[in-house]
Image (cartoon, rainbow, N blue to C red):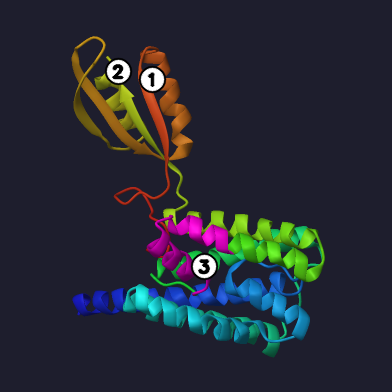
C-alpha cells in the first residue's frame, strides 16, 4: 500500500505543481501585468501588445502564437518535454483569461513600480513551480532551446536575446520610453525568483576548515551546533604537512558562532564559506516542491 501511494504521489506531484504554478502565473498577469501593459518578454509579451491595440484576450493569443513554436519544437526537442510544455502553456493561458476576462479580477495597485515588482515576483514564482514540474509554458524558452541547438550559444543567452527584443519592441509599440524599463524590471525579478525556486532558498552555509585544532572544532560542531560534517585527509602544499580538512553545512544563523569559536582557538585557521541553496539530509528542510 505504501509503495503504491508513493508511486501515485511521484506521478501526480509534477502535474499538481504545473497546475499550481499556472494559477499563480494567471494571477500575476491579471493583477499586475495586463492592467499596466507590462511586457515580460516571450510570446506573452507579444500577446499583451496585441491586447493593448486590439483588445484580444491575452491567453487566447498566447495559444495561437505558440502553435508554430510547438510544431517546430516538436521536431527538435524531446516529445515528452514538448507535450508537458504544451499542457503548461494551455493551462497557463486558460488561467490568464479566466482571471482577466471571466472573473475580471481588478488591478491590485495603481502604482507602476509596485506592480512591476510584485508582478515579477508572482510570475517568477509561478514559472519556477512549473519548471519544478519538469515543464514550461512555451514561448521564448523553447525558442531559446532551438536557437541553442542550431547556433551553439547557451539556452539562457538565447532566451535573453528573445526577451530583450520583445521587451524593447514594447517601447515602440506603446510609444513610451518607460514601457520597456518596467518590462526589464519584471524580467529581472522574475528571473531571480525562478532561480530561487529551482535552486532552493534555505541559504545554508557550506564551511570548509583547515586548522591545527580540528579536534576542538569537530567537538564544537557536533556538541554545540548539533551539526555533523566530514573530516578529509589533506596535505599542505606550502608546509608539505599532513592534516585534516573539516567540511560541514550549518544554518546561516550559526555561522557567527562558529566563526567566533574558530577565531578564538586558532586565529591562523583557514576557513572557506559558501552559500548552499538546497541541502538534502537529516536536520535540513529541502526546498518545497521537490
SS label for mark 1:
helix
The label shown at residue 282 is none
For the residues bearing labels 3 and 2, Cβ distance under 8 angstroms: no
Look at the picture and state if 262 lies above or below 163: above
Residue 222 appearing in the image? no
Within the image, what quadrant is residue 165 found in?
Answer: bottom right
Measure how far apart labels 2 and 1 are at the Cα level: 9 Å
C-alpha distance separating marks 1 and 3: 42 Å
Q: Which residue is mark 3?
A: 127
Counting from the top left corner in percent of width and height, residue 41 is at 61, 66
In the image, which is nearer the foreground, mark 1 or mark 3?
Answer: 3
User: Which marked residue is nearer to the observer: mark 2 or mark 1?
Assistant: 2
Report the span colored magenta. Answer: 138-162
> Callout 1: 10 Å neighbours few (<14), some, many (20+)?
many
Q: Identify the disc placed on residue 262.
A: 1
- Residue at 42% across, 60% down: 151
Q: Earlier in the sequence, mark 1 or mark 3?
A: 3
- Tell me the quarter of the image containing the N terminus: bottom left
Residue at image position (26%, 11%) is: 238
Residue 192 x, y percent position in the rendering? 55, 54
Residue nearest the observer in this picture, 28 or 89:
89
Amino acid at each position: 500500500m505504501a509503495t503504491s501511494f508513493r508511486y501515485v504521489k511521484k506521478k501526480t506531484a509534477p502535474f499538481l505543481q504545473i497546475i499550481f504554478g499556472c494559477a499563480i502565473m494567471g494571477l500575476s498577469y491579471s493583477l499586475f501585468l495586463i492592467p499596466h501593459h507590462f511586457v515580460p518578454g516571450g510570446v506573452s509579451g507579444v500577446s499583451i501588445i496585441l491586447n493593448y491595440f486590439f483588445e484580444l484576450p491575452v491567453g487566447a493569443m498566447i495559444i495561437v502564437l505558440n502553435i508554430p513554436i510547438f510544431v517546430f519544437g516538436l521536431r527538435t526537442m524531446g516529445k515528452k518535454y514538448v507535450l508537458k510544455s504544451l499542457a503548461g502553456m494551455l493551462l497557463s493561458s486558460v488561467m490568464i483569461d479566466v482571471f482577466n476576462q471571466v472573473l475580471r479580477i481588478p488591478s491590485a495597485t495603481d502604482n507602476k513600480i509596485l506592480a512591476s515588482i510584485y508582478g515579477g515576483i508572482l510570475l517568477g514564482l509561478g514559472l519556477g513551480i512549473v519548471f519544478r514540474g519538469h515543464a514550461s509554458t512555451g514561448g521564448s524558452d523553447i525558442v531559446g532551446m532551438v536557437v541553442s541547438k542550431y547556433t551553439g550559444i547557451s539556452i539562457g543567452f538565447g532566451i535573453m536575446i528573445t526577451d530583450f527584443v520583445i521587451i524593447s519592441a514594447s517601447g515602440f509599440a506603446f510609444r513610451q520610453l518607460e514601457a520597456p524599463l518596467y518590462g526589464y524590471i519584471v524580467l529581472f525579478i522574475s528571473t531571480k525568483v525562478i532561480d530561487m525556486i529551482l535552486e532552493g532558498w534555505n541559504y545554508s552555509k557550506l564551511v570548509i576548515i583547515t586548522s591545527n585544532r580540528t579536534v576542538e572544532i569537530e567537538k564544537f560542531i557536533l556538541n554545540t551546533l548539533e551539526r555533523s560534517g566530514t573530516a578529509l585527509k589533506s596535505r599542505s602544499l606550502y608546509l608539505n604537512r599532513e592534516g585534516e580538512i573539516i567540511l560541514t553545512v550549518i544554518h546561516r544563523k550559526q555561522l557567527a558562532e562558529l566563526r567566533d569559536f574558530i577565531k578564538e582557538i586558532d586565529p591562523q585557521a583557514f576557513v572557506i564559506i559558501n552559500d548552499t541553496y538546497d541541502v538534502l539530509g537529516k536536520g535540513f528542510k529541502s526546498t518545497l516542491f521537490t
